[in-house]
Amino acid sequence: MNSYCTATYRCYDENADFGKKAAGIAVGLTVGSWTDLPEAKKASMQPYLGQVVDVAESRNELGERYADIRIAYPDVNFSRDIPALLVTVFGKLSMDGRIKLMDLHFSDPFLSAFSGPKFGMEGVRSLLGVHDRPLLMSIFKSVIGHDLPALREQFYKQALGGVDLIKDDEILFENPLTPLEKRVKVCMEAAKQAEETTGQKLLYAVNLTGPTSKLAEQAVKAVSLGANALLFNVLSYGFDTLRELSAHPDITVPIAAHPALAGAYYPSPYHGISASVLLGKLMRLAGADLVLFPSPYGSVVMPKEENMAIRHALLTDQPRDYLHSSGNDGEPHAGRLTLAKSFPVPSAGIHPGLVPLILRDFGQEVVVNAGGGVHGHPMGTEAGGRAFRQAIQAALSGVPLRDYASEHEELHAAIEAWGVRE
Amino acid sequence: MNSYCTATYRCYDENADFGKKAAGIAVGLTVGSWTDLPEAKKASMQPYLGQVVDVAESRNELGERYADIRIAYPDVNFSRDIPALLVTVFGKLSMDGRIKLMDLHFSDPFLSAFSGPKFGMEGVRSLLGVHDRPLLMSIFKSVIGHDLPALREQFYKQALGGVDLIKDDEILFENPLTPLEKRVKVCMEAAKQAEETTGQKLLYAVNLTGPTSKLAEQAVKAVSLGANALLFNVLSYGFDTLRELSAHPDITVPIAAHPALAGAYYPSPYHGISASVLLGKLMRLAGADLVLFPSPYGSVVMPKEENMAIRHALLTDQPRDYLHSSGNDGEPHAGRLTLAKSFPVPSAGIHPGLVPLILRDFGQEVVVNAGGGVHGHPMGTEAGGRAFRQAIQAALSGVPLRDYASEHEELHAAIEAWGVRE
């Protein structure tokens, strides 16, 4: 019984015979040659042969000619890991002209090798005891060159504002001023102290860095020191490293995937890997409990439809296989394999005035994430967090922000500073 | 005493104030804020502040406005590893509009954390006992769906043709037909058998695949089974994994870095990471003994100047720091830190008629690498290897290929099939 993972490419070429191009990919990236094989050999090689599923030709808004080409790759050809899949479907091909990897579809047998997010969206909610509203995350304002007391103070002020998660800056590495060992201790103390005031739990995602082979050990150390979440720059280490960390039995906290370096892959229409594959499907497959990505609202802009495609990849299950088994089928399939959902965290340039927009696009299945929108609040960091919580409450209640702000001074001040987009 | 690694970006924007943009990067990716700091705080934060080294504005051939911006990042801000450097200089920034990472310069302190290629070009030559000519590498024709005897036969024919290295296909993963354990044994036997005829040593680069944390173990196993080289899909695992493998004391064979997935990064002028950084500087820094990359001659085309930039990065030493120490300088510097050279392997679409061109561009510091140009030879695989060796001999002797071919039938047949570009 054959099973296949499929890859969809967008391939630009003014003159190519796209059908021929597709056939060339299906053969070239699997058995290598086909038409010149003897018939008997073809029979034995058939299970290893890639299949052209679809070729759809079109032109973009600039009049450039392209085709969306979908190829099915037999699972027998590669081991059940992300490096093998990516090298198979886009290793050599990535360098072959104007071609972008737009989508991936994982077969059930391939999927079965992955356990996905250990906590996922629901698990993160359970840890925090918050099930009825979007979560709120904040980012340190600046960390490099600051000592432990300064870091603690920043942390404490954020925590007092009522945020659910605080993440390290992704550019904070091991350093003499705030090494992980001391940072976790100090920040978790500040979290506890704030909890006495807010009555609210908080996750601190500490940045996991260093040599690849020491990451698991470092993560376990962080957990043993009290860290209750991790931040990880996935793309600088590879998806398989995230998968291993996520599957590690002693790493008993959620992992938030940072999109650092993602812009090296997704923005070009002609090259690279689409955002929904890179920051959506592969992050979830590899086990990210939360995934940060550039929002369409703020300073680092990603088009809205790409954001929604990421959201879809993180939250919904993929459709059934494009190519079914060629064996004795007709049997109803067993229950679809699914992975836990990854929490979407659209980031960058977020202020309280954007919250209704975020909730319209993401519903409650979102973490509102802000840095400048918290620390830059006219009344300070703590008020910044409160303004966001107020904005979330208003949006959930269907009350226009400006109305709600008339009785909430923090939200009022935020709107004065940054406005509202509803 | 401060030291800095520098990054050069090409940033496209029709209207931007590039000087302001550069200053924003230098502050934003280091201390976070600057102008609003009190003077006393500025003094203490100065060592952590990024520096704008250069901003050079221009327009490309399409009339688009861009600037090459060079920023120096204090080494104190990041740990001495490639993930930390990349996340610092291009993590968030990669997603910030039309910006491409064009170049990196490593400070001496940063470089000092890397041992570089364990063998390098000279080490590979010594293993083979060949110092007076370019090397010749060949690739299996097709591997997927083939059993061990078929693989052995392909290997043996390539070896008989006089190639110096044979590499696995990068899409050959663990599989029931030709698992690494059996593949290494069978191929190394074939190599030994061929050596009895050719009198020539041969390196077999076996593809290192599987879960990240098992790669070192798998490599050591391959070596213990007799493998005398490894092939590694670096970009699917991350540069730091290559560094760890290269530095591993029990992995006592050269590592050839495959460029699979590189096309997701380098081809766009507006986004990604340049080929010379990706396949040049970082591969060498991480310890690749040989680096494959798309040649400018054949089917998967990379512009000539990018190829030459990769060559330069693999073979020559970087200039001294752009920003020197701010301490009590004036002392002559100690000997420059250098890494062993990585052997350049321009690949794809190579046939014997291209050899003079390759040697003109790369001199003897090159591995001529062919797949179809060996196996597709009209007289067969073995003759294919011989034709390449003859072409190399002709080019080294300064004899035009067509003249040399008049007395060498394999080269003659190759030229009949594919022509000559001199």
Image: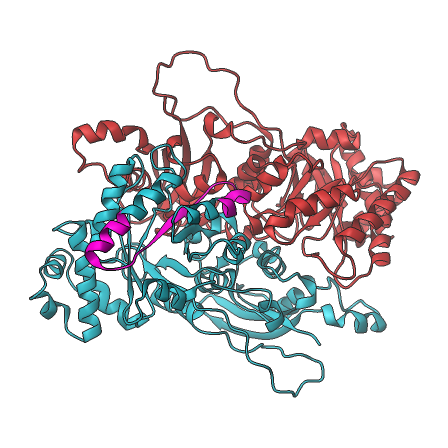
Chain colours: A red, B cyan
Residue B385, position as x, y percentages in the image:
20, 56
Q: Quadrant of residue A422?
A: top right
Q: Establish if A2 lies above or below A386.
A: above
**Residue at far right of view:** A197
Spot occupied by residue A341 in the image (x, y as percentages of width and height): 62, 30
Q: Quadrant of the N terminus of chain B?
A: bottom right
Q: From the viewer's perspective, tell me whether residue A228 is left or right of residue A248.
A: right
Image quadrant in which you'd find residue A325: top left
**Residue interval drawn in magenta:** B190-217
Quadrant holding the C terminus of chain B: bottom left
Does the image show residue A84?
A: yes
Q: Residue at x 56, y 25 (%)?
A: A338
Q: Nearer the viewer, residue B397 or B347?
A: B397
User: In the figure, is residue A163 to the left or right of B89?
Assistant: right
Report the residue that reaches farthest toward the left: B406
Q: Position of residue A66 (x, y in %)?
A: 35, 44
Q: Look at the picture and state if B16 lies above or below A296.
A: below
Q: Quadrant of residue B369?
A: bottom left
Does the rendering let one see residue A411? no
Q: Which residue is found at the position 17% from the left and 59% from the top?
A: B387
B244 with respect to A178 (left or right): left
Query: Is B193 one of the magenta-colored residues?
Result: yes
Residue A163 located within the stretch drawn in magenta: no
Q: Position of residue B24 (x, y in %)?
A: 66, 65
